[in-house]
Amino acid sequence: MRDILITLIVFGSLPLIFRAPVNGALMWVWISVMNPHTQGWGFATQLPFAMIIAVVTLFSMALSRTPKGLPLTPVSVLLLLFVLWMNVTTPFALLPALSWVQWNKVMKIMLMSFVVMMLIRTQRDIVRLIWVLVVSIGFYGIKGGIFTIRSGGTERVWGPEATFIGDNNALALALIITIPLMYYLQQNSDRRWIRHGLAGAMVLSALAALGSYSRGGLLAIAAMCLFMWFKSGKKVALGALLCLVGPLLLAFMPERWAERMDTINTYQQDSSAQGRINAWSMAWNLARDRFLGGGFEVSDPGIFARYAPDPQAVHAAHSIYFQALGEHGFVGLALYLALGWATWRTAAAIIRLSRGKPELAWALGLATMSQASMVGFAVGGAFLSLLYFDMPYYLMAALIATRILVEQSLEAGQPLAAHGRLVRQP
């Protein structure tokens, strides 16, 4: 039944994509972030839904007369430079065969990220994009939260297999990125049942993140909550809510969970933590030796034997920063950090331009909560190999479009209609 439902949704969306390519961008985000086919049990798990959506979307773009140029902003330009640099480092990779396989995957992600940036242009499109992200990850948050309650927190929560968020730590980080977006939608909804539903989804998602037993996730959710409280205009109310809900969620988790979290303070004795430090040292030594880095996929015994302090402890980078450093050198890391900083500054600019303007309250809230998501990703990503996880790039697309709309509104001195275009005042 699940396979039939997913197949009907995908093929049923094709006429809508032909009518408006932005629908294809949203469907792509849903397919790539949620991976709904992994929830099937039969033929749907083998069908190339992503390829079908991508091809139809690109074909619809070619036929459409709507504007579809790439917005040239600091974020999009830096992302383009980062992608171009990947294409410079890959031909010189230490493991060419594996590197080209990963290059093929990453370039597809980046291509469609640029497509999303080209097609998301109106306020309505932006809000729809946020809803797609929330539904895609929130599904696993609700499911994982219920699982945690049923198991009493004794079993770990995992994501869908063979996806970016299949690992328990990766799922925790994805949920942490999504919770601020849930809060944004809740605060901007007029329907009570949606507000209540999103409130429940936030609690269950936080419980699922804890139930993943991710130590990096715990640090990320703490940083994200602290930032949300700092940015809130209702510090007393939000602080009281966090002080009430936080201890309740932590108290629910069993002693086994608390013992694992306590290893944060004793990382010197933890083999997993020491393995990550060894991988980080390897990436540092590799980047110092090779200006272009090692190319994609450097978690190899031969490479560790040459560059790691402990050649026997072969691990993935377990850090977006050291992953960029090891695979693409200091230039790659610099471009990635600059991309993150430009995204942060874009959100900050939206906040500055929208503050005190009721008609732009939607943009102010989105930019603020996007920064909360970025804080969570920056902290949690320091311990995970999620450099190419596509959700942050889609959030960049939302911020690019939002800033353009805000600047257009201020230049014209007119408020924005719900669809995002300017409204002429008499």
Image: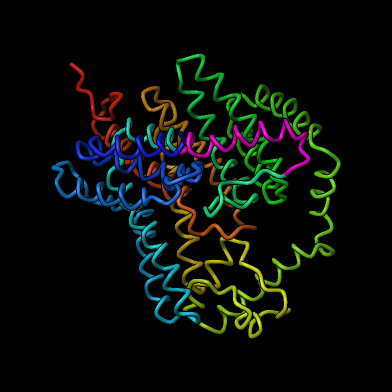
> Is 135 one of the magenta-colored residues?
yes
Q: Compared with residue 380, is residue 196 higher up or lower down, i.e. above or below?
A: above
Residue at left 41%, top 73%?
Answer: 100
Q: Compared with residue 26, is residue 187 higher up or lower down, i.e. above or below?
A: above
The residues colored magenta run 133-155
- Picture mark count: 0
Nearer to us in this view, 341 or 245: 245
Residue at left 61%, top 61%?
Answer: 319
**Quadrant where the image shows the C terminus:** top left
> Is 251 one of the magenta-colored residues?
no
Residue at left 46%, top 36%?
Answer: 2
Q: Compared with residue 130, is residue 240 higher up or lower down, i.e. above or below?
A: above
Nearer to us in this view, 9 or 387: 9
Residue 148 in sight:
yes
Nearer to us in this view, 63 or 321: 63
Residue at left 42%, top 76%?
Answer: 89
Residue 187 percent across, percent down from the top left:
50, 23
